Image: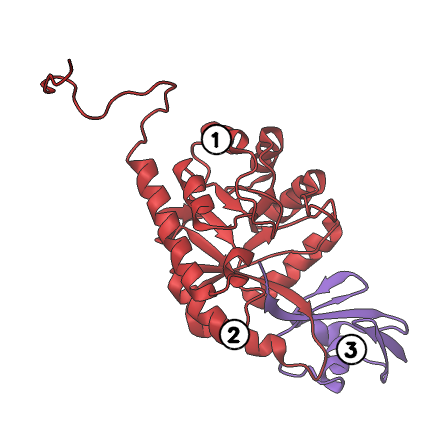
Amino acid sequence: MSSFYGVELKSRLLLGTSRYPSPAVLERAVKASGAEVVTVSLRRESGTGRAGQAFWSLIQSMGVRVLPNTAGCHSVKEAVTTAHMARELFDTPWIKLEVIGEADTLQPDVFGLVEAARILSEEGFEVFPYTTEDLVVAERLVEAGCRVLMPWGAPIGSARGLNNVYGLRSMRAHFPEIPLVVDAGLGVPSHAAAAMELGYDAVLLNTAVAEAGDPVEMARAFALGVEAGRAAYLARPMEPRDMAVPSTPVIGKAALGD
Amino acid sequence: MRIYLNDDMHEVAPGTLAAALETLGFGGRKIATAVNGRFVAASARPRTELADGDRIEVVAPMQGG
């Protein structure tokens, strides 16, 4: 069990809903992943369009909790206004807060992120900030009221895995009581397992599943990776060492040499 | 008067945001709104008077990561 703002979740995999080949594949992938939380967003809709309404009906039919995001927001004002719209539309205080600072890497604008997190936390939002592994920024986010931190593994959609294992490990050690989620940049289940082996509480991913050749099977594979990584963390892995140590006992070995 | 809804210009009768949304086909829809960059809650739409040139944003649930 992992707890996010008092909500207990059995699954440690949070899944995005974007870029799937079809709504039917999305639905099957969510089911195969075992995710209890999916991320959603807001976009303009015309008076004649019905895409948003159809998508919302599908999400509701899945019986999952939603985590709305502020994706694409580049300023504090945009992110805060988007959060207000999301809270009303999705009827949840949860918000995955993104304030993007750099177009090529989609790196968070951590200064704007802290400012927006403070505003939203004071207004009663439960903020899931998409941040970097910078410990000073993380401290500021906690001071601002965040009770979950979501450092990136690598740039969004890059499938590069954990770019800074040392930084992520430091963050886990520095914030033993704060739920930590590696968000973004994962490509294969071993990346998710590695994050969980570091003691992270969960992972959040989207593109790695949605753009796989078989998204449903990849969703299942990620669920297994997350479960394996978590079990390994709880089993306390041995320390790496520089030299070989025979695993087979030497005592009692038959003397067969010359 | 002229208003801009998601950047598209529309000619509507002077009135409230709720009335304009109804006229433009959003009645009963699951949407969220902002006027001139400021969030307007659903409950406030019937008492939000629009002015000529107002910029309205209308968003709906969408896939997200």
Which residue type does callout 2 highlight? Answer: Pro
Q: Residue at x 55, y 62 (%)?
A: A211
Query: In the rendered view, would you say A49 is above or below A195?
Result: below
Q: Position of residue A3 (x, y in %)?
A: 40, 47
Q: Secondary structure at mark 2?
A: helix
Q: Residue at x 64, y 42 (%)?
A: A118
Give the residue number, with chain letter if any, for mark 2.
A23
Instruction: Count neighbours of disc 3 (C-alpha within 10 A) and say few if under 14, some if 14 to 19, many if 20 or more.
Output: some
Q: Secondary structure at mark 3?
A: loop
Q: Position of residue A120 (x, y in %)?
A: 63, 49
Q: Colour of chain B?
A: purple
- Horizontally, residue B44 falls left or right of residue A56, namely right
Q: CA distance from mark 1 to mark 2?
A: 37 Å
Do circles 2 and 3 both sit on a common chain?
Answer: no
Q: Chain of mark 3?
A: B
- In-front residue for pair A137/A220: A220
Q: Colour of chain A?
A: red
Q: Chain of mark 1?
A: A
- Horizontally, residue A10 falls left or right of residue A188, namely left
Q: Residue at x 62, y 77 (%)?
A: A51
Give the residue number, with chain letter if any, for mark 3.
B16
Q: In which quadrant is the C terminus of chain A drawn?
A: top left
Whether residue A88 is visible: yes
Q: Position of residue B47 (x, y in %)?
A: 74, 73
Give the residue number, with chain letter if any, for mark 1.
A169
Whether residue A36 is visible: no
Instruction: Count neighbours of disc 2 (C-alpha within 10 A) and say few if under 14, some if 14 to 19, many if 20 or more.
Output: some
Q: Residue furthest top?
A: A258
